[in-house]
């Protein structure tokens, strides 16, 4: 009996020692992992500060170099030295408080360069505004201002391209690689694994996937590592950096369980909601009143984009109207002499938000009344169209008064073409997402029009194709895209065989 007690005591002591050793091993592993995280964080902080410092050095160096090239003097005058000094202060104010110096791992370099260019333009715009208001920049060379802006921005962009390129090469060769696992095996999970494997420059290596009992089928390119009960232990044992959750939004209890299982883990958890199958428009993530919100469908022109678009429309419309004012007078006289009736034809159409707006055109038809309020589209050889009107419609000159609509704020120069109210009522039930065109102001010209989709829409397929191009414009809007469409309109879009 004593021997048995003695053996039991020894066994218990051995088990306790083993558990203590295992706990020590786990604690040591966790300590190593946490130390790696701390070192990594310090390294990123160091790189961020180095990039901040390099931007300031490039800003000062570009200002000095342009001054030397412009005036042939190595020494800066007091006025230019003060301007460069103020530039450093504006850089600290504008650049430091933004997300420019965050980690851009996995994001395309074009996104970072666009962010940089936007902030750089804002910074120099504030500098110039300050100089004008304080009357402190009249004696500074405009050539120097422009050269300073261009050279410093180019140098800052080049620096980022070099840094990003170097980092991408190192990651593709196995340096600075993050480990990841995927939870779920649906379409989204397959897409995540495929994307991370094909874009090795992002430096994320997928170890495998965990089953969540709602999987549609297995992921064959990486191994199955277990189910949800195995996830936390694997993440801790293998020191996984990222957990990608690819589950449907209906599986809330499983997502909550994963978060609970990883409560004490320092791994990054990324949720990819099951949205790929939905028809989304300008989806994004933002905070509203401190709450995280996923925009499933949103207007593409909000905030700064709306301001840029409004400035673009007003400035271009005013300049164009000044240039074409003699032509407007001549066309107006010709319309008046061609047939009885008003010079301007006004028609109600849908504007932004589906609100009715009045669209102006030069009258191109004989005055007539539509039967039962039905709006019939113009067809080839339409007897309602005057001879002058046929020429105006074919060359799009009948639409020139719409630049006045742009100045009024009811239309844009570029956007989906406005359709008659009756046509909207007809097609919104027949063409998917038809009314999404009205999330922006209608335009005088658009992406559909420069691709030949003009004139009569006598088949449902033609209207569906036009809507497809309009929605592509909404999804991909940018100032450069607008300029591209205007360029195409000027050289290819005015005369079209489909316009009659």
Image (cartoon, rainbow, N blue to C red):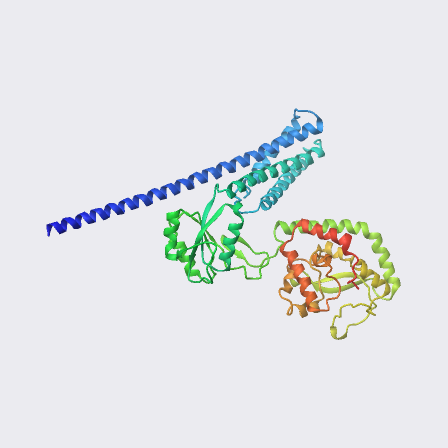
Q: Does residue 352 appear anywhere in the picture?
A: no
Q: Does residue 129 appear anywhere in the picture?
A: yes
Give the percent coordinates (x, y) of residue 252. Answer: 44, 60
Give the percent coordinates (x, y) of residue 371. Answer: 77, 75
Residue at the farthest front position: 220
The residue positioned 22% from the left and 47% from the top of the image is 14
Q: Is residue 272 above or below residue 124?
A: below
Question: Residue 139, located in which quarter of the rendered image?
Answer: top right
Asked whether, in this view, residue 472 is left or right of residue 315, the answer is left
Give the percent coordinates (x, y) of residue 288. Answer: 52, 54
Asked whether, in this view, residue 352 is left or right of residue 325, the answer is left
Residue at the farthest left position: 1
Q: Is residue 239 above or below residue 355?
A: above
The residue positioned 77% from the left and 49% from the top of the image is 319
**In which quadrant is the C terminus drawn?**
bottom right
Question: Residue 86, located in which quarter of the rendered image?
Answer: top right
Tag count in the figure? 0
Question: Residue 160, located in which quarter of the rendered image?
Answer: top right
Q: Is residue 97 above or below residue 257?
A: above
Residue at the farthest bottom position: 372
Give the percent coordinates (x, y) of residue 342. Answer: 83, 64
Of residue 147 and residue 441, the one placed in the foreground of this image is 147
The residue positioned 65% from the left and 61% from the top of the image is 468
């Amino acid at each position: 009996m004593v021997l048995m007690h003695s053996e039991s005591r020894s066994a218990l002591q051995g088990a306790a020692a083993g558990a203590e050793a295992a706990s020590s091993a786990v604690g040591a592993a966790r300590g190593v992992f946490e130390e790696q995280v701390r070192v990594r964080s310090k390294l990123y902080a160091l790189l961020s500060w180095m990039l901040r410092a390099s931007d300031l050095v490039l800003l000062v160096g570009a200002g000095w170099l342009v001054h030397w090239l412009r005036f042939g003097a190595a020494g800066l005058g007091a006025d230019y030295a003060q301007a460069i000094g103020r530039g450093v202060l504006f850089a600290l104010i504008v650049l430091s408080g933004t997300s420019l110096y965050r980690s851009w791992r996995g994001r395309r370099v074009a996104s970072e360069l666009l962010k940089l260019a936007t902030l750089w333009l804002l910074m120099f715009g504030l500098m110039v505004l300050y100089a004008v208001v304080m009357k402190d920049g009249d004696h500074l060379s405009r050539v120097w201002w422009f050269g300073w802006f261009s050279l410093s921005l180019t140098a800052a962009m080049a620096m980022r391209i070099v840094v990003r390129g170097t980092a991408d090469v190192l990651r593709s060769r196995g340096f600075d690689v993050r480990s990841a696992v995927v939870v779920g095996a649906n379409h989204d999970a397959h897409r995540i694994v495929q994307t991370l494997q094909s874009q090795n420059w992002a430096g994320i290596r997928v170890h495998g996937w965990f089953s969540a009992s709602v999987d549609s089928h297995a992921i064959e390119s990486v191994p199955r590592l277990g189910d949800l009960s195995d996830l936390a232990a694997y993440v801790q044992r293998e020191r996984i950096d990222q957990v990608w959750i690819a589950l449907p939004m209906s599986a809330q209890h499983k997502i909550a369980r994963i978060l609970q299982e990883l409560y004490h883990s320092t791994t990054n958890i990324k949720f990819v909601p099951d949205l790929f199958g939905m028809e989304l428009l300008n989806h994004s993530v933002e905070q509203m009143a401190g709450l995280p919100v996923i925009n499933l469908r949103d207007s593409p022109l909000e905030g700064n984009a709306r301001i840029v678009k409004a400035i673009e429309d007003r400035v271009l419309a005013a300049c164009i109207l000044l240039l074409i004012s003699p032509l407007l007078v001549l066309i107006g006289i010709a319309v008046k002499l061609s047939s009885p009736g008003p010079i301007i034809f006004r028609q109600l159409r849908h504007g932004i938000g589906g609100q009715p707006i009045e669209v102006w055109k030069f009258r191109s038809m004989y005055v007539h009344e539509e039967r039962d309020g039905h709006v019939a589209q113009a067809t080839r050889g339409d007897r309602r169209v005057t001879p002058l009107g046929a020429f105006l419609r074919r060359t799009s000159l009948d639409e020139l008064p719409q630049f006045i609509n742009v100045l009024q704020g009811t239309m844009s120069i570029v956007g989906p073409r406005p359709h008659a109210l009756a046509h909207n009522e007809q097609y919104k039930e027949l063409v998917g997402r038809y009314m999404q065109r009205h999330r922006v102001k209608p335009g005088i010209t658009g992406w559909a029009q420069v691709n030949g989709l003009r004139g009569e829409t006598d088949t449902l397929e033609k209207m569906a194709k036009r809507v497809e191009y309009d929605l592509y414009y909404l999804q991909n809007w940018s100032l450069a895209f607008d300029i591209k469409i205007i360029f195409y309109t000027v050289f290819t879009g005015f005369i079209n065989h489909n316009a009659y």
